[in-house]
Image: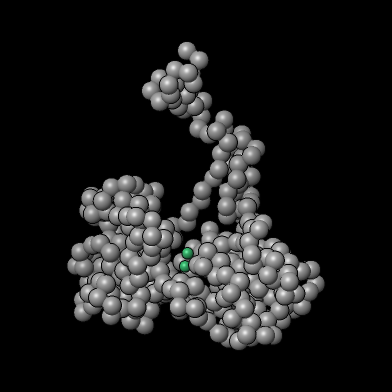
């Protein structure tokens, strides 16, 4: 049987997205593909262009093992090489040096013979999974609300069995399996003998910001504040759907003084914080991986999941490493007035 190639992975992504990826006929950035998007904060030199499809790799190269990843980093590249992965399908846009340990992508990827695909805004809106995980079925999805690419807005009706706010939290608890992340963090604390470790998969689950657990859910607005969603957007959505009773924010959270909190309170809307961005690998990565595995049945598809743990400095590393780090800092990094020597 012929081996699966990088080109066939590209074709599978094109099939899954209904033709949204860049193929041979389309040029990057010529304006013909609306999913080729320049993402910029206007910080000089820090913009990146999303190019859905093949970022790097020979189309004829065979692929035996493929990993679905949220964000490419040097740890991802190293894990891919160490575990025999030939191709990475990365959700968030890939950028030279930023996504591969500070060196040009080509050098690192060529070194390990790795092909890399990216699929971000071109994947958003293809399935209703994020809404379903939070207990509602979309009746309206806009992935470019107010003309801002990536400002995804979903209006949804609660699923059967989701009548009050506590039902949303119970569904997230059931679906996301964060109880195992809590156990994993507890084990890490015991192994490293550090009690104040923090880890994002374990830290944040669903919570109610405004409203009581027994409040009726009603029509839901699901928004993602990190994409630029603001109170003015809320006003515009409420003009379209005045019967909205509950706002769910997910991927990113609204904290302390975020204007949406007061705005929702003043309007009498329930406000619920759903899954954090750390869980997007389950929300978007896992469905994509299953779709790829179904089309490319001869290759092995795996999921790379990120865990980032916060250690207090005094508990980071083992004692020989801490000794090494203190020595390097004192001998080479610090002016004498900081070392007391
Ligand atoms: Fe996403
Ligand atoms: Fe994301």
The answer to which of 18 and 297 lies nearer the viewer is: 18
Query: Which residue occupies the foreground of this view, 155 or 44?
Result: 44
Left or right: 44 as drawn, with respect to 132? left
Q: Is residue 116 visible?
A: yes
Q: Residue at x 35, y 67 (%)?
A: 38
Which quarter of the figure has residue 93? Answer: bottom left
Q: Is residue 99 above or below residue 310?
A: below
In the image, what residue occupies the spot 32% across and 46% down? Answer: 102
| Figure coloring | one colour
Residue 276 percent coordinates (x, y) = 57, 61
Q: Residue furthest top?
A: 341
Is residue 271 shown left or right of residue 96? right
Q: Position of residue 341 (x, y in %)?
A: 47, 12
Q: Would you say 310 lies left or right of 265 here?
A: left
Depicted 84 relative to depicted 151: above or below: above
- Image quadrant assignment for residue 180: bottom right
Left or right placement of residue 206 versus residue 84 in this view: right
Residue depicted at x 71% and y 64%:
209
- Residue ID at (51%, 74%): 152
Q: Quadrant of the N terminus?
A: bottom left
* Up/down of 15 relative to 260, above or below: below
Q: How far across and down, in percent of the image, does residue 154 sit?
A: 56, 78
* Number of numbered markers: 0
């Amino acid at each position: 049987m012929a081996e699966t190639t990088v080109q066939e992975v590209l074709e599978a992504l094109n099939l899954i997205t209904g033709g949204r990826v860049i193929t041979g006929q389309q040029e990057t950035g010529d304006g013909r593909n609306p999913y080729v998007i320049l993402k910029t904060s206007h910080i000089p030199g820090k913009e990146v262009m999303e190019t859905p499809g093949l970022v790097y790799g020979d189309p004829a190269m065979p692929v035996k093992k493929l990993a679905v990843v949220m964000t490419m980093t040097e740890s991802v590249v190293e894990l891919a090489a160490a575990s025999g992965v030939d191709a990475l399908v990365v959700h968030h846009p890939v950028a030279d040096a930023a996504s591969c340990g500070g060196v040009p992508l080509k050098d690192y990827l060529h070194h390990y013979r790795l092909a890399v695909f990216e699929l971000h805004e071109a994947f958003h809106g293809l399935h209703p999974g994020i809404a379903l995980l939070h207990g509602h079925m979309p009746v309206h999805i806009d992935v470019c609300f107010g003309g801002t690419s990536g400002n995804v807005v979903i209006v949804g009706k609660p699923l059967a069995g989701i009548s009050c706010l506590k039902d949303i939290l119970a569904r997230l608890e059931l679906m996301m399996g964060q109880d195992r992340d809590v156990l994993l963090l507890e084990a890490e604390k015991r192994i490293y003998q550090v009690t104040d470790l923090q880890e994002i998969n374990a830290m944040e689950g669903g919570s109610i910001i405004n409203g009581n657990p027994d409040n009726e859910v009603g029509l839901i607005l699901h928004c993602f504040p990190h994409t630029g969603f603001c109170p003015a957007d809320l006003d515009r959505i409420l003009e379209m759907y005045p019967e909205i009773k509950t706002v769910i924010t997910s991927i990113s959270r609204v904290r302390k003084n975020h204007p949406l909190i007061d705005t929702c309170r003043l309007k009498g809307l329930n406000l619920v914080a759903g899954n954090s961005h750390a869980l997007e690998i389950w929300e978007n990565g896992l469905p994509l991986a299953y779709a790829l595995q179904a089309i490319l049945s001869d290759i092995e598809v795996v999921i790379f999941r990120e865990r980032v743990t916060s250690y207090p400095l005094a508990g980071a590393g083992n004692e020989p490493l801490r000794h090494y780090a203190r020595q390097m800092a004192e001998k080479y990094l610090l002016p004498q007035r900081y070392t007391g020597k």
